[in-house]
Image: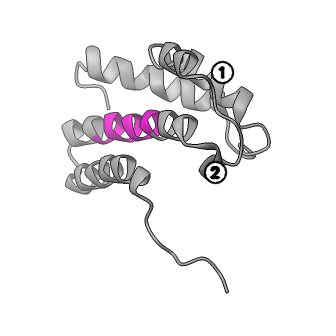
């Protein structure tokens, strides 16, 4: 018997942010494209933080000590380093360098967003 296709409660936040992004993308305006990009980036960051904080039974491996997770949470590059260290073998096809570049772009859009899309 296979596992039931159920939505896990810890996925609710990232899913909500992605749905928000899709709603803005559908509007097709430059402002909405910026908001969509910001929402996707927020979803990615929340997904990483959530994954790293999950119990061993769910993630399948020991996570970082709470202090280290909290310290990594204040720096996106450090958070990616921690993910890379603890999720070896689970990031096939995912380029963390690309994620970091898009996060920087998101910061420009969020903090300086002078009409850039």
Instruction: Determine the CA span between mark 1 and mark 2.
Output: 22 Å
User: Which circle, 1 or 2, is nearer the viewer?
Assistant: 2
Count the marks: 2
Tell me, yes or no, whether the highlighted magenta stretch contains residue 78: no
Residue hosting label 1: 81
Q: Is residue 103 left or right of residue 19?
A: right
* Bounds of the magenta segment: 36-46
Residue drawn at 28 percent across, 51 percent down:
25
Residue at the extreme bottom of the image, as rendered: 1
- Image check: 33 left or right of 40? left
- Residue under the point 45% across and 33% down: 45
Tell me where residue 52 appears, x and y as whole percent: 57, 35
- Seen in the picture, residue 68 relative to 84 is either above or below; the reply is above
Residue 50 in the image: above or below residue 5:
above
Q: Position of residue 14 (x, y in %)?
A: 38, 47
Assign the C terminus to one quadrant of the image.
Answer: top left
The answer to which of 101 and 94 lies nearer the viewer is 94
Which numbered marker is on residue 57? 2
Tell me the SS state at disc 2.
Answer: helix
**In front of the other: 26 or 21:** 21
| Secondary structure type for disc 1 | helix
Q: Quadrant of the N terminus?
A: bottom right
Q: Position of residue 80 (x, y in %)?
A: 60, 25
């Amino acid at each position: 018997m296979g596992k039931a296709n159920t939505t896990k409660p810890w996925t609710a936040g990232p899913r909500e942010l992605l749905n928000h992004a899709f709603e803005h993308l559908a509007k097709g305006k430059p402002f909405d494209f910026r908001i969509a990009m910001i929402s996707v980036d927020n979803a990615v960051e929340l997904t990483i933080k959530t994954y790293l904080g999950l119990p061993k039974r769910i993630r399948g491996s020991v996570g970082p000590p709470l202090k280290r997770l909290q310290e990594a949470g204040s720096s996106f590059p450090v958070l990616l380093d921690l993910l890379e260290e603890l999720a070896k073998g689970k990031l096939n096809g995912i380029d963390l360098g690309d994620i970091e570049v898009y996060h920087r772009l998101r910061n420009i859009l969020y903090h300086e967003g002078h009409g850039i899309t």
